[in-house]
Image (cartoon, rainbow, N blue to C red):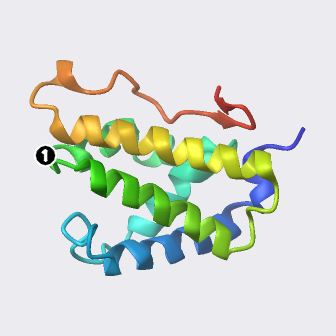
Amino acid sequence: MTSLYEHAGGEEVLHRVEEAFYDKVLADPVLKTQFAERLPDHVDHLTWFTAESFGGPDRFTKQLGFDHIIAVHRNLAITDEQRRRFVELYVEAFEEAGLMDNDAFRAAVRSHAEFGSEVAQQNSHAKTDEELHPIREVPRWTWDGDD
């Protein structure tokens, strides 16, 4: 069975999806406090994370490491509304790229975004390391969800 990464079309396609997603969150009234300005490497980092999570190259782990994603979300105090909107826009970017014709892929993308946003939200409120979500590596997502 092909990986989610292969099904999506690889890194180039995922980069285009993440670019479209990033444009959405930068313009979104609910998320603009979390995404106040365009960061030069953010789309690349999002792409690396998604690619690795979907079964592609482990560039995110090798070049940034999971501690990076924990540090980025610390003290953001992500609200439930922001978490839900993030997932909505993420799925929308995949839909607009024409990648959601397969129901299993659609479900995997949504569950990936839901899980990731829950981890980010928990970490955004953590005052101590003990309050952080226990995951410490990029999750490997499969057609059935978290591997």
| Quadrant assignment, res 17 | bottom right
Q: Quadrant of the N terminus?
A: top right
Q: Is residue 119 left or right of residue 30?
A: right
- In the rendered image, residue 69, in percent from the top left (x then y), is placed at 34, 44
Frontmost residue, 18 versus 48: 18
- In the rendered image, residue 87, in percent from the top left (x then y), is placed at 46, 55
- In the rendered image, residue 38, in percent from the top left (x then y), is placed at 30, 77
Q: Is residue 116 visible?
A: yes
Label 1's element?
loop
Above or below 140: residue 120: below
Q: Residues within 10 Å of mark 1 (few under 14, many from 20)?
A: some
Residue at horizontal 39%, vertical 68%?
Answer: 41
Frontmost residue, 48 versus 99: 99
Frontmost residue, 147 versus 62: 147
Q: How many marks?
A: 1
Q: Is residue 92 left or right of residue 13?
A: left
Question: What residue did someone put label 1 on?
Answer: 75
- The amino acid type, in three-letter code, at marker 1 is Asn
